[in-house]
Image (cartoon, grey):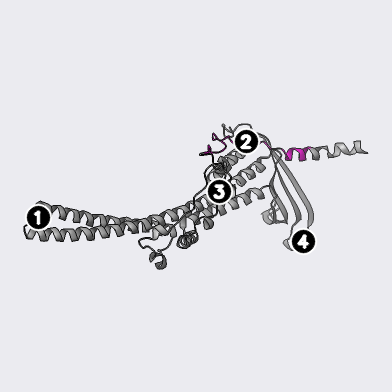
Amino acid sequence: MTENLFPRFAPLAAALLLAGCSLIPTYQRPAAPLPEQWPASAGQQASTSAAEATPDWQTFFADESLRELIGIALAGNRDLRVAVLGLQQARAQLGIRSADQWPSVNAALSGSRAPNGSGDIASSYSGGLLLTAYELDFFGRIASLKEQALAQYLASEAGSRSARIALVAGVAQAWIALLADSEQQDLARRTLATREDSLKLVRLRFEHGAASELELRLAESLAESARVALEQSARQRAQDENALVLLLGQPLPDSLRALLQPGRLDALQLPTLAAGLPSQLLARRPDIQQAEQQLIAANASIGAARAAFFPRISLTAGFGSASKELSDLWRGGSWGYTLAPQLLLPIFDAGRNQ
């Protein structure tokens, strides 16, 4: 009994075996030319875990004003929105590639009227379910394209996280720079006040003959230099504030602007990372993960390119009813089905596949 059934199911078994075929090269992560960990300094050994070495920004930044600014930027930054939309686009493309592995079934209704040889009008109507050009993925071309789309989606997800981290770092740097500008501007303001008081004293001495004109001109020059430094510090503060506003996607709130006071920079404390961390932590960087997923996507596209050299088998089928009258299509029509497989083998394409 088994010997009689084997020839009948042998083509089906061969088709299932070919359907699992993949021409994607085996991916191997490139070896990083880095030591396993940094050389130990002063006998200190690395005991920090990966989770402790890469804390979340809410844990890393303890300053409430800075955390508020980062939250505003994550909600309103335009570049981050573009990165999120790119992630959604990659997810949709993955859905399209996944859908290619399944047949598309459509409801079809068609009709035609044409004169026959006797001068009468002949009518023909048909309706039913139609499956159009479903590709049987014997050589893994569609599966390779799906793997490529999956890797591109993962690369987009890593790119989105990289943009998020870059935004957090940019906001922190801009806020610290703005606090430093406030300190610098206050120092320039106090310097100008000192130089102006000194100029008044030298002018008074010059008017009473106790100082020369050279001393007066030198005091005026120092006062003007201090005034220029004050204007430069004000301009630098305005530029840094504009840069921060660009990252936030909205104007700087008045409650946070009121915190730009001298001495605020000294109160801002940031934790430090432990020394001697393993180099494997580099693999946790989203930009490196993005680059690796792009490499995996390129590796999967090789499988699709190789499969293009093999025959492509597609299937078109239909099931429905046909009738000469539209009113009798579903009542007195003749039911039937059509099955039209097609095999295409590339012979000459002017080197396109190559």
In screen coordinates, is 154 left or right of 252? Answer: right
Q: Which residue is mark 3?
A: 53
* Whether residue 117 can be seen here: no
Q: CA distance from mark 3 to mark 2?
A: 27 Å
Q: CA distance from mark 4 to mark 2?
A: 58 Å
Q: How many residues crowd around disc 4 within 10 Å: few (fewer than 14), some, or many (20 or more)?
A: some
Q: Which residue is mark 1?
A: 211
Q: How far apart are the two marked residues, 2 and 1, measured between alpha carbons?
A: 81 Å
- Judged by depth in the image, the label closer to the viewer, 3 or 1, is 1
10 Å neighbourhood of mark 2: few (<14), some, or many (≥20)? Answer: few
Give the percent coordinates (x, y) of residue 182: 34, 59
Does residue 119 belong to the magenta stretch?
A: no
Number of the front mark, 4 or 2: 2
Residue under label 4: 330
Give the residue furthest to the left: 209
Mark 3 and mark 1 residues within 8 Å of each other at the beta carbon: no
Quadrant location of residue 310? top right
Q: Amino acid at mark 4?
A: Trp
Q: Give the mark nearer the N terminus: 4 vs 3.
A: 3
Secondary structure of residue under mark 1: loop
- Amino acid type indicated by mark 1: Ala
The quarter of the image holding the N terminus is: top right
